[in-house]
Structures are given as C-alpha cells and as structure tokens.
C-alpha cells in the first residue's frame, strides 16, 4: 500500500511537471499566471534596490534626509532608487508605476531597459511616461509576438480608432486617425506588409467611413474588397483623375467649414458633418515612376495633389495610408515633401538599412537597428513609430484575403452615398469567372 501511494505521488508530480512544460509552450498565458508571475514578482521585490543601484538608477539623498537617516534612524545612508508606487499584474507581464527622484529622467530608465530585462528575468521591458515624474515600467513575461492573440478589450476607443496589431508589451496597436491622420507603411516582399493592410481594411470596413483605393497593380490587392470601396483606381491615369476629384472634394469641405466658422470637420454638428474618407495607396512607387519624359507632367500633377492632401486634408476628414517597398527622394520630385506629412510610420522587414532610415530615421533614429534585426521567418513583425520619438515592435495577426473580403461583403451597406465618386466605383463580381480551357494539342 505504501509503495502504491508513493507511486501515485510520483506520477502526480511528473504529470504536473509535464503539464507545466506543455503550458509553457502551448499556453504561455497559463504558465505565466501559475509560475512566471509569482517568480518574477518575488524577484522584483527582493532585488529591486540592488538592481537599481547596479544599473545606475539611483541618486544621492538630500542633506536633510541623510542627516535624519544617520542620526535619528541610526542606519546607513544609501542612494535612493525610484519609488515604487504600484505593482499591477497583467495576463502577459507585470506593470510597475515608479516615481522618479530628483535627478533622474525617463531617458535614464529607458537606456537601462535591457539590463533590467536580464536582471528581472523577463522577455522585454518597455517604458511609458504617464505624467511628469511618474513612469510605468511594463515587463512582458514571454514572447507575445510569437503567437499573436489580440486582447478582447482595447483601452482606446473612438469614431476613427482601428485595432491593427499587437505590441510587444501585450497591448493593442491601434490606428487613431484623429491623433495620427496620415501614415506610411514600408516593407519588402513577404514581410507582412499586405497582411497589415488587410487587417486595417478589415477594421475600417466596420466603421461608417468611405474607403478610397489606389492600386496601380491592376487592382490585384484591393479589387477583392470592391463591395466596401467607394472608389478604386487601378492605373496611374485613373489614379490621377481620382486624386483630382479628392482635392476638389477637399476644397468643397473647406467651403463648408468656412460657412460655419469652424476649423475642423469634427466641430460641425453631426447632421452636417461629411463622412470621413480613408485613401489607401498600395505600392506608392507606381505613382512616381514613369517610362518616358512625356509622362512626367502627369506624374508631377499626381504628386502635387497628394502633397496637398497630406498638408490640408486632415481638417476635413480625409486621411492617407501610403504603402510601399521604398519611399525616398530617389522616387522623384515631391517624394520627400509627401513623406514629411506622414506622421505614423510602420516599417516591416526591409532589404537594406537605407529603407529603414527612410521610414524611421527622421522620427525615431533608435528604431533603425530594431528594423534591420527582424528575421525573415517571422512575417508580420514591424516597428511602429511616430513624430513623438516613441517606437515599439508590433505584429499583425494572420488574416487571409478571404476573411477581409467576407467582412467587406458583410458591411457593404455602410458604403456612403458619394455621387462624386460614382465614375470610380468598382464593379462587384458575385463569382470569380472560371479560367478558359486550353485548346487541345492534337485534333482527334
């Protein structure tokens, strides 16, 4: 009987260890909640002061504090680390709110994030400044980008907010067009750039907005989303005419703002407010490259219209989403001017360092190294930054073109009534035509 009990106990221990090993690989959230979180919390609690001292994140106390410590408390005067205000566990890591002492700034803690990651035994450490003197240290316990699972609830919400990807700290990366009206997405072939665009269209299709597509590759990427598009241009000539119509629509909306003495479309009453428009440009280089000198005038006209939209269209609810493999001055006149208007930057894996510098070098120079280290076997991973200098790694969930097309068909009734775009309204095919059969090689 004693041997049987011992055998059952040993079997239970082995089964528990095997279950934890399986959960660590297949269910990392469960493993983190059961094992990772208690161990990391205890390591942080016991080693916090010594870790901060080793990492150089302490300051000398004031003279009065040192006097009280030495003469009243009868203890040794030690440097002061940031004060821990709150520790909050999450499903993917640990969130710590710190009050910085006088003499430290958030950049000092951000520079030591890699050392803190190894000291606390977590996968990544990111920093967010919540208010002056207070920062939030977000520690992620495991690689959340290995298997992307979007959070059920998104903190940021609004009329023009679309969750697109997952950040490396476990939160959702959203496209908020009210805050970041225009964006540039770069990436090499098979880097996940098209998947990012599919997730964006899938989210926008559910909102009461008008989608304007420009796909000069004969519409091979965007034509399948025709039920939800208000306009689609598949050639450079059609794109030029469509951009002229967009600029005319922008000027009409400015006349409306002037009539009601407001400077932003969202200040108008809801019954008078025009529908927002999102212009999706796939492979922007096709709008810049010309085969002969006689086409340069049309190219310059298109570029000028896009620059005008980038400079002024935000106030009237027209937003730009520009995608491409490269985007720099070598494309031609006006390329750099247009890029300067694109606040949001998302750069996937690229083939050269210069492309990464084109996308992020002017807004977040530190992120260029992170872009060049993206592996080819992890498509969908990108580095997102903006004009504030903040950046972070993201990854879009895997979405097939069929899933996005199904969402576009489901919400086809949300296409706004815009007669000005009727000449560019794409034809909706119910079924895909069958390929023509090849003629026989020999006559029977």
Image: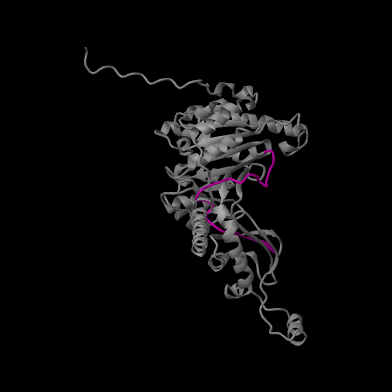
Specify whether residue 47 is in view.
yes
Residue 252 appears in which quarter of the rendering?
top right
* Quadrant location of the C terminus in the rendered image: top left
As for residue 140 lying within the magenta part, the answer is: yes
Of 179 and 433, the residue lying toward us = 433
Q: Residue at x 70, y 71 (%)?
A: 101
Question: In this picture, which residue range is highlighted in magenta?
Answer: 134-159
The residue sitting at 46% across, 39% down in the picture is: 285
Q: Quadrant of residue 241?
A: top right
Q: Which residue occupies the foreground of this view, 386 or 382?
A: 382
**270 vs 86, nearest the viewer:** 86
Query: Predominant secondary structure in magenta?
Result: loop
**In the shown orientation, is residue 361 left or right of residue 104?**
left
Q: Position of residue 435 (x, y in %)?
A: 38, 21
In front of the other: 259 or 69: 69
Residue drawn at x 52%, y 33% as measured from the top left: 403
**Residue 90: quadrant of the picture:** bottom right
**Whole-percent x, y for residue 267 in the image:** 76, 38
Image coloring type: one colour
Q: Is residue 81 above or below residue 331?
A: below
Q: Is residue 262 left or right of residue 356?
A: right
Farthest-out residue, front: 1
Please state the horizontal and vertical placement of residue 5, each as a whole percent of the image.
52, 62
The percent position of residue 369, horizontal first and vertical second, equals 48, 58
In the figure, 26 relative to 317: above or below? Answer: below
> Is 71 positioned to the left or the right of 442 in the image?
right
Residue shown at the point (56%, 59%) measured from the top left: 141
Magenta span contains residue 92: no
On screen, residue 164 above or below 125: above
Let me know if residue 168 appears in the view: no
């Amino acid at each position: 009987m004693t041997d049987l009990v011992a055998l059952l106990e040993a079997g239970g221990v082995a089964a528990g260890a095997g279950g934890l090993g399986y959960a660590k690989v297949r269910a990392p959230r469960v493993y983190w909640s059961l094992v990772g979180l208690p161990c990391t919390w205890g390591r942080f609690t016991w080693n916090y002061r010594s870790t901060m001292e080793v990492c150089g994140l302490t300051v000398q106390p004031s003279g009065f504090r040192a006097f009280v410590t030495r003469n009243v408390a009868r203890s040794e005067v030690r440097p002061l680390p940031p004060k821990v205000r709150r520790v909050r566990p999450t499903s993917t890591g640990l969130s710590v709110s710190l009050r910085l002492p006088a003499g430290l700034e958030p950049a000092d803690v951000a520079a030591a994030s890699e050392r803190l990651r190894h000291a606390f035994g977590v996968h990544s450490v990111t920093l967010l400044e919540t208010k002056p003197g207070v920062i939030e240290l977000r520690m992620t316990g495991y690689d959340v980008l290995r298997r992307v699972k979007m959070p059920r609830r998104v903190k940021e919400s609004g009329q023009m907010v679309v969750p697109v990807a997952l950040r490396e700290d476990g939160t959702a990366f959203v496209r908020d067009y009210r805050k970041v009206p225009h964006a540039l997405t770069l990436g090499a072939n098979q880097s996940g750039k098209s998947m990012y665009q599919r997730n964006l269209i899938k989210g926008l299709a559910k909102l009461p907005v008008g989608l304007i597509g420009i796909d000069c590759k004969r519409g091979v990427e965007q034509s399948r989303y025709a039920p939800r598009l208000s306009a689609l241009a598949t050639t450079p000539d059609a794109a030029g005419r469509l951009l002229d119509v967009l600029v005319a629509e922008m000027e009409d909306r400015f006349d409306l703002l002037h009539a009601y003495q407001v400077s932003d479309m969202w200040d108008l009453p809801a019954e008078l407010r025009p529908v927002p428009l999102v212009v999706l440009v796939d492979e922007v280089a096709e709008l810049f490259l010309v085969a002969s000198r006689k086409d340069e005038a049309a190219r310059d006209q298109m570029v000028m219209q896009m620059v005008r939209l980038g400079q002024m269209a935000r106030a009237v609810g027209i937003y730009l989403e520009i995608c491409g493999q490269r985007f720099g001055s070598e494309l031609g006149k006006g390329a750099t001017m247009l890029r300067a208007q694109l606040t949001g930057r998302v750069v996937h894996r690229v083939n050269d360092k210069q492309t990464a510098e084109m996308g992020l070098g002017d807004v977040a120079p530190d992120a260029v190294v992170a872009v060049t280290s993206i592996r080819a076997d992890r498509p969908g991973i990108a580095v997102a930054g903006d004009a504030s200098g903040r950046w972070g790694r993201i990854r879009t969930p895997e979405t097939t073109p069929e899933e996005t097309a199904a969402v576009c068909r489901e919400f086809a009734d949300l296409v706004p009534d815009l007669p000005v775009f009727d000449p560019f309204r794409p034809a909706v095919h119910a079924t895909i035509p069958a390929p023509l059969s090849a003629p026989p090689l020999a006559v029977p």
